[in-house]
Image: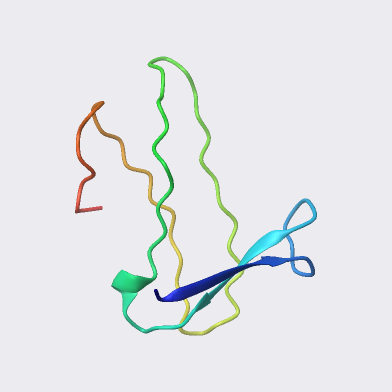
């Protein structure tokens, strides 16, 4: 839609590869990524992290973690 994702082997934060994300549109709605949901267990600790290298003055990135009750729909406000 609005992005091209490829494997990057030169610029990496850790490990051997990173994801190179190239935006092909100025329409933000066409550049969002979502991951599958995961089940969490009460009382357990979880760590969410991300590393971004932004070499585009107009580029922006954010990590959104949304908590919801099991079986509920995704929220539309973050």
Which image quadrant for residue 69? top left
Q: Residue furthest front?
A: 1
Of residues 63 and 30, which is closer to you in this image?
30
- The colour mode here is rainbow
Residue located 39% across and 83% down the image? 25
Return the x and y of residue 32 as percentages of the image width and height: 38, 64
Name the residue located 43 percent from the left edge and 60 percent from the top edge.
62
Q: Among all residues in the image, which is located at the extreme top?
A: 43
Q: Where is residue 55 in the image (x, y as percent from the top left)?
A: 60, 79
Q: Where is residue 70 in the image (x, y as percent from the top left)?
A: 26, 26
* Residue at image coords 60%, 57%: 51
Is the N terminus in the top left, top right, bottom left or bottom right quadrant?
bottom left
Left/right placement of residue 6 relative to residue 28 reads right
- Residue drawn 38% across the image and 16% down it: 42
Asked if 14 appears above or below 7 in the picture, the reply is above
Total count of labels: 0
Establish if 11 lies above or below 18.
Answer: below
Where does the image place residue 75, in percent across and percent down from the top left? 20, 46
Side of 76 relative to 54 (left or right): left
């Amino acid at each position: 839609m609005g992005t091209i994702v490829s494997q990057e082997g030169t610029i990496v934060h850790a490990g051997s590869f990173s994801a190179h994300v190239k935006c092909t549109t100025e329409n933000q709605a066409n550049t969002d990524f979502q991951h599958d949901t995961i089940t969490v267990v009460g009382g357990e600790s979880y760590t969410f992290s991300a590393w971004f290298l932004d070499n585009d003055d107009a580029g922006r990135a954010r990590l959104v973690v949304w908590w919801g009750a099991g079986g509920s729909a995704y929220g539309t406000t973050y």
